[in-house]
Image (spheres, helix red, strand yellow):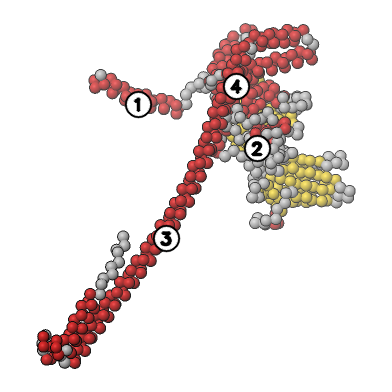
Amino acid sequence: MNKMAKLNYPWLSAITGILTAAYLYTSSSSEMSSFYPLPAELVESPYRFLSLFVFAAAIFFDSYRFHQRRQSFDLQVQRYEQQIKELLQGKNKLQHKVRKYSDHADKLKLFISDRLLEHIEYDEKFLHFRNIAAEVRHNGVICYDKVVSSLRQAMQTADHTDAKQYREALDSMAYLWVLLDLSTTDNIAMYIANKLYEYEEQYYQQLLAGDGEASPYSPTFPARQAIRKAVHGFIDNDLAQPNSNGDDNAWRYQDDRFHIELRADGELLGDENYLVLLTENLINNALFYSGKKRQKNPHARVAIRLADDGDRIRLSIYNRGPEIPDEMRDKIFQLGYSTKRAREISGNNRENTGKGLGLYFVNEIAKGYESTIHVENIRNREDAYVIRIELDNGEKLTEIIHTQLDENRLPRCRMAEDGVGSEKTLASMEYRFKETITSIEITSQATQKTWSVEPPDNGGATLFLDPQNPDHPRWCLEITPLKTRQKLLFKPLDIGGVQFTVSIPSAKSRLDPDYHDMDDDELDDTEQLDQHLGDVSQYVDSPLSR
């Protein structure tokens, strides 16, 4: 704390002045000398000058002291002014922070209130929907039985074409009934898990009884059949048949929206409509993002794969949607959470209202099957390609193309001779030849795999896509005949997207004796829990507790 500045009165010069004036007056006045006689030596001139000198010295001393005090006072005033200025600045900063935090608090209150209103409104709508579904299910049992009975009777007397339509109608009614069951239950995952345990017991009894006493209702279903049933509603053309080349029994289909390859022949427990619902929701989610202008890519389709490794059946669905951050991977499966907005939904996607039900059902069904869902962000990556071209005159050419990512993480082409730090990049590389191309080989530096092709002699443009990644090809190669030459175009493709992979235990794996055993970690936790309970029981059984 700063001390207060002191301004003292010039007492020394004042007293010295009075004494000097009195001395000079007394020594020079004869009348005063008679009253106050002074010694003769004090009346002399040197003492008078000495008194004046003392008086002048007193004045000088007081003046010097006053000047020092004044400087100290001025410095103190400056410090006070600086402190006042800092206080005013601090006050302004505090006022600015108060206004800023007040605005943030108001925005936070508005955000919380909006979210609460959304959740309250959503909960009310969901409860209302569930009540309606329960009422429909309760009152529609008789109608459902009548429709199903009529369809079965009509299917027995109809020809092959009509019987197929009746069978599809019966399957649709069963699917509708499953939807009503799931929409009216309080815990979808537990409901499905209990159903699976019932099917598991039936499956076990069926295997013990043998084929002769098998139940007419199969507790298992082929996984590929359920996926084909799910994609049937999204495909306009007739479904393709499995290939019969060698031992490849995969079911494949491809159009401008889908690339489907189903290899799994394994079976799953339960009702196939559960897997149909899971697949349809993932496909709807994929089509929503793939249809957006920003993610649209004519070469990157919604890729659906089904694989079987014996113990588990894996369903993978890839789409060109935006990346999902790590902190959002759990939220996307929450009830009511959705990244879709109503203003983004128009045209053919009007059914997607973004209410956060699709992925919620997917997660609940997956938990009921005791399966896992893996969310993977598919990203573009840098690579180098060696293209070897052979012409019909025997000439062989080699081109090296480096692909690098720009500021938007989109792949761009750069020639090898441009240097690593070169900023000259192109969306595609074009080559023109006067001779006809007879063969092409492309080697990827990242995979060290070579792909070769012989262009067909059909006189038209030919497009080749990356065969190593048929789901999301990383490059395309186009050969276009011109009047006097041929054009070869190499273009890296943007494959940024998201892939959902659901890994479901097969029916046979659930019969494994070790399937229902707890893991070692769970056993360790149980032993620790028993130890804690034992410690507590000592206090409970002690005499002090009675």
Q: Which residue is mark 1?
A: 532
**What separation in Å lies between label 4 and label 2 (alpha carbons)?**
29 Å
Evaluate whether residue 188 shows in this view.
yes
Q: Which SS class for mark 1?
A: helix
The residue closer to the viewer here, 49 or 443, is: 49
Q: Which residue is mark 3?
A: 85
Sequence-wise, which precedes: disc 4 or disc 2? 4
Q: Is residue 512 left or right of residue 249?
A: left
Sequence-wise, which precedes: disc 2 or disc 3? 3
In the rendered structure, which amino acid carries the disc numbered 1? Answer: His
Residue 495 spot, x, y in % from top left: 67, 41
Q: Quadrant of residue 129?
A: top right
Q: Which SS class for mark 3?
A: helix
**What separation in Å lies between label 3 and label 4 (alpha carbons)?**
64 Å
Q: Nearer the viewer, mark 3 or mark 4?
A: 3
Marks 4 and 2 close (CB-CB < 8 Å): no
**What separation in Å lies between label 2 and label 1 (alpha carbons)?**
49 Å
Q: Which SS class for mark 2?
A: loop
In the rendered structure, which amino acid carries the disc numbered 2? Answer: Gly
Label 4, residues with CA under 10 Å away: few <14, some 14-19, many ≥20: some
Q: Is residue 540 left or right of residue 311?
A: left
Disc on res. 321: 2
Disc on res. 129: 4
